[in-house]
Amino acid sequence: MNPPDDRRALNRPWGLLAELTHACPLHCPYCSNPLELVRRSRELPTEEWERVMREAGELGVVHVHLSGGEPLLRPDLAAIVAAAVRSDLYTQLVTSGLGLDGARLDELAAVGLHSVQLSVQDADPVNSELIAGRRSFAAKEKAAAAVRERGLPLGLNVVLHRRNLDSIEEIIALGEAWGVERIELANTQFYGWALLNRATLLPDRDQLARAEEAVERRRERLAGRIELVWVVPDYFDGVAKPCMGGWGAVSLTVSPEGTALPCPAAYALEGLEAPNVREHSLEWIWEESEAFNAYRGSDWMREPCRSCAHRDTDFGGCRCQAFALTGDATRTDPACRLSPDHHIIQRIAAARPADPTAVPFTYRKLGGQQTPPATAPSTAAPSPATPYDAPASTAAPSTAGAPPGGGSRPAEGPPPGR
């Protein structure tokens, strides 16, 4: 597909997701990184990330999320933050909190880090660590305290699913106790590792309704103090979510080895020739590359999207979810009730097991077998696993407890995603 003829009509991106590494000390069953992880030896070096930050500023980006994996596993993180700040980018560290002690935070704050987003799996330490696949809760609590002591804005990110939705009020209360300014309550998106664990993560309509009602009650009480963001679920409303605010419209992702994508889950899209920042500038990638133009606008759409009144607001839904569930990224997102494939979503929701614990988690593995933590919550802050020079590749996941077609190609059954 050719790029738009009118370059002036092409929006400039405001956001950059910089995935500095895929290495991570946690083993979350909904991990948003691709099934095939980038090895540490293939990661962009410091000077390449510094150039990416410079080009992002020149392109019009104003906000960079420094993410992973766990970005704290990059010893050059301060240099990357400094490069972003020099390019007038607002910098947000997206972290598990493991390894974020006072000394490291002081180093990052000294070069201009603006804010921190901390992930947590549940308000209950035992369940939080069960979901994370390792002892981690105490480290998160200490990291939150360190951020607030230094006066940096702190946000909380919680991926919601069947195993923690009933704790939604406690999770919000935890954020309030930790002094956060914003809590992102993101219902699991079922592609990638989450798709492998869909049987145990997928809630039902009633559980989601109770959780959303609880959020609304808390939102009224916390108005003006804490922003609560509820990211709607995919499988139950019959409405497709806008795909990244429009494919290649507002943000871009750069992976650890430099692959540039319009969406962080687009690794899985077969046939998408994703460009690399080692070979092209961000400006060329944004304006000229086939990958970023593939699903811009509406010319690519099929019916019912092509003639739908919502085509310019929901953009046909999620391309990665369409691919994951149908094997064809050009089809209408099956989450939409108007999609000819909506029956796929309905069948999945109806087939969820009655007992969420009947199907065990398939944990993300890095350098060996991962087992759930002991039931007692942690009292000591663990140090991050996976040294900088270790590979971040992952073995083929065990499919025990995974949904049918667990790691297979999408046309044959549910595959990978974020």
Image: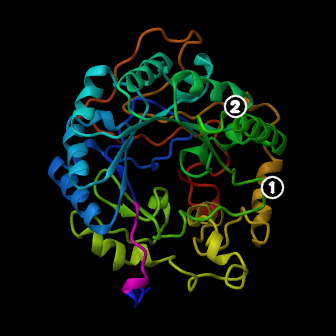
Magenta extent: 7-14
Residue 205 versus residue 346: which sits nearer the camera?
A: 205
What residue is pinned by disc 1? 347
Residue located 59% across and 26% down the image = 176
**Whether residue 343 can be seen here:** yes
> Which quadrant would residue 252 be assigned to in this image?
bottom left
| Nearest to N terminus: mark 1 or mark 2 | 2
The 10 Å Cα crowd at callout 2, few under 14, some 14 to 19, many 20 or more, is: many
Q: Residue furthest bottom?
A: 5
| Relative vertical location of residue 8 with respect to residue 382 in this rendering, above or below | below
Residue 8 part of the magenta-drawn span: yes
Whole-percent x, y for residue 233 in the image:
69, 50
**Residue 382 placement (x, y as % from top left):** 39, 17
370 or 169, nearer to the observer? 169
Q: In the image, residue 133 lies at what x, y percent? A: 52, 26
What secondary structure predominates along the stretch shown in magenta?
loop
Q: Residue at x 37, y 36 (%)?
A: 70
- Front one among 66 and 29: 66
Disc 1 element: helix
Residue 267: numbered disc: none
Name the residue type under label 2: Ile
Q: Secondary structure at mark 2?
A: helix
